[in-house]
Amino acid sequence: GKPGSYRLRVSKNGIRLTASTPEGIFNGVQTLLQLIPMGRNGLFKTRGPFKLPCVEITDEPRFEWRGMHLDVCRHFFDKQFIKKYIDYLAMHKMNVFHWHLTEDQGWRIEIKKYPELTRVGAWRNGSMVGPYNDHNTDTVLYGGYYSQKDIREIVKYASARHITIVPEVEMPGHSLAALASYPELSCTGGPFDVAKEWGVFDDVYCAGNDKTFEFLQGVLDEVCDLFPGKYIHIGGDECPKTRWKTCEKCQKRIKETNLKDEHELQSYFIQRIEKYLNAKGKQIIGWDEILEGGLAPNAAVMSWRGTERGIAAAKAKHFVVMTPGSHCYFDHYQGNPEYEPHAIGGFTPLEKVYAYDPVPAELNVEEASYIMGAQGNVWTEYINFPKEVEYMALPRMCALAEVLWTYPQNKNGAGFVERLNQHLDGPISILCNYSRTHQLVNFILSPASEGVDVTVYTLDSTRTIFAHANTISPNGLLHTDTTIFKAKKTGTMHMVKKPMVLNAYSEKRNEKGLIQNRSKHTSIELYVSKSTSKNITFTTDPDPKYKGNGSFTLVDAVRGSKRRQNHQWLAWQGKDVEMTIDLEKKQKLKEIKVGSYQDESNWIYRAQDIALLISKNGKDYTKINTLSKHGGNGGPYRESYQFKFHSKKARYIKIIAQNPGTIPEGKPGAGNPSWLFFDEIEVY
Ligand code: ACM
Ligand code: ZN
């Protein structure tokens, strides 16, 4: 069998676990532990005997690289937590821990030859607090590092659990902490501070200075000595070429080595390091930028900016680990941002992780054999404490573990959630602050002849859902609750009333009817109006990147959130927008509200002028008014355009919005066409 495979037989006569490797035995024990029936509060039923189910399991992993990553640089996590994190991997039969040890914001590994790395580079004079765009930093000294003794202890701990640690030493970019310690390794000579803000910085190792390579080789000598695994991760991502373009030494190197440009200089950099490490019997792996300017001959690639570069590398017969942002970044939101702690962005819910297949359809069987597996990444800009790491990593790690172990034909989403809940009620519930986001109630809206239909569901279909609606009275107060829905499964409600708030939660009871746990409430505000579920046509279709739920998005009775969630908005770049709503019959109209969005850091500007026209026959239109809001600034916020007029009869409504044009100088994305976002056209 494959490394890690095992056979487990539980029968009346006893338990028999066999494997051809110690790793296989270890995996079999993890399975056996999962078979032990759990008491309340995640404790084993240790008082008195318990029964194991009789099973015969022949099991093997689908992939050899079943990884989790942790960034200990943006925030530092001590030795105790690293061991706990390794326990989580082991429990899920994962076998690679990618330890992101160096960054702009901190150097976290003791290097005896270069003591300044931890004396200076492990500490910063403050950290960003709050969302990136606020650019707030505190002034609290922050840092920490692992001594070589700590590292040896952790490597041993991981090894006992059949987990290989892949250390990452970032180069040529994300290296400010090293440059703050040894500024002579930069193009300009510095001085530098260890970064306080998150982001990508222009100052990187000088590729023209042989001292840079001497230094990195010295660092890598000690790293290789500490980590017995085959792979060393050399980073390679997000390296601006700004300094290299004007650095005499770098330009001299380009000339003397007959390189075409700075991308080839990065390639030279990585290849020189690869040669050094290969000679020491190690292989390099790097982020997918290492493809630019020519891939080092033996390098493995970690595909993070989508899967395309992983596909290209596999076709070129390089080993690949898949870790696309869309499915494997566990620093992204796992649920509706309204109910989640602030995260870096994105949307990667549990079911999306579970549905992931690391082998892209574009690869044939031979090429697919270069996909070693996949990995979940936990970047910690917005994750300060161990509890928060746990919350972001689990249960998405559980889903990824199954993706990496189980062959696709044996995967089953509903079965997974049921087993997951059992698992989460087990010992892990006393160890770990995992997220219960998948137990929250979700809402799906669909068109109905009058109003909208709202389907409520949780990923865990064994939970009871409670939902109730409150109508919003004209003075904004809520009327009394009406419980309108209670079911042990997904259900659909028909909404025809005026503005209302729909609240829902789910709960789980045990056999005795006692509440085991209850989810937090989730809610949506529904603005059912004359336009709800009616047909809309556009003269120019929305951009495919922001097509929401089709044109229904604009008339689904839900206003786009000011914390922008892309599925709620339709967007156009650099174009005026003209849309026509057919109300199906002539009716009296007196108020129309159009929602637009403003967020200059994401190149989104509210509409400049919006014209409203109405028609009885769809041919002859009467203009009602044009609303102008020039000079959108800042953001993010939702901007509502409200047309109020004396009651008029019409069947068709036409809205013509002017794009704000090219982004002005001094703003993010200056010179590019701006984006125009719309959500919800309400007609009263
Ligand atoms: C990365 O997320 N910069 C690899
Ligand atoms: Zn240079």
Image: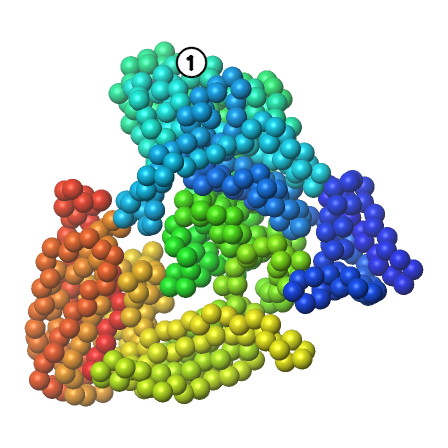
**Residue in the picture at 37% in, 64% down:** 338
| Quadrant of the rendering where the N terminus is positioned | top right
Residue with the mark numbered 1: 211
Asked if residue 137 shows in the view, the reply is yes
From the top left corner, tell me how far across and down residue 352 is, in percent. Answer: 50, 58
10 Å crowding of disc 1: few (<14), some (14-19), many (20+):
some
Q: Is residue 177 left or right of residue 679?
A: right
- Work out whether 586 lies above or below 322: below
Q: Is residue 73 left or right of residue 461?
A: left
**Residue in the picture at 55% in, 48% down:** 358
User: Which residue is nearer to you in this view: 269 or 601?
Assistant: 601
Residue type for callout 1: Lys
The secondary element bearing badge 1 is classed as helix
User: Which residue is nearer to you in this view: 124 or 210?
Assistant: 124
The image quarter in which residue 152 lies = top right
**Residue in the picture at 38% in, 14% down:** 209
The image quarter in which residue 675 lies = bottom left
- Work out whether 582 lies above or below 110: below
**Residue in the picture at 27% in, 82% down:** 477
Farthest residue, direction top: 256
- Work out whether 104 lies above or below 31: above
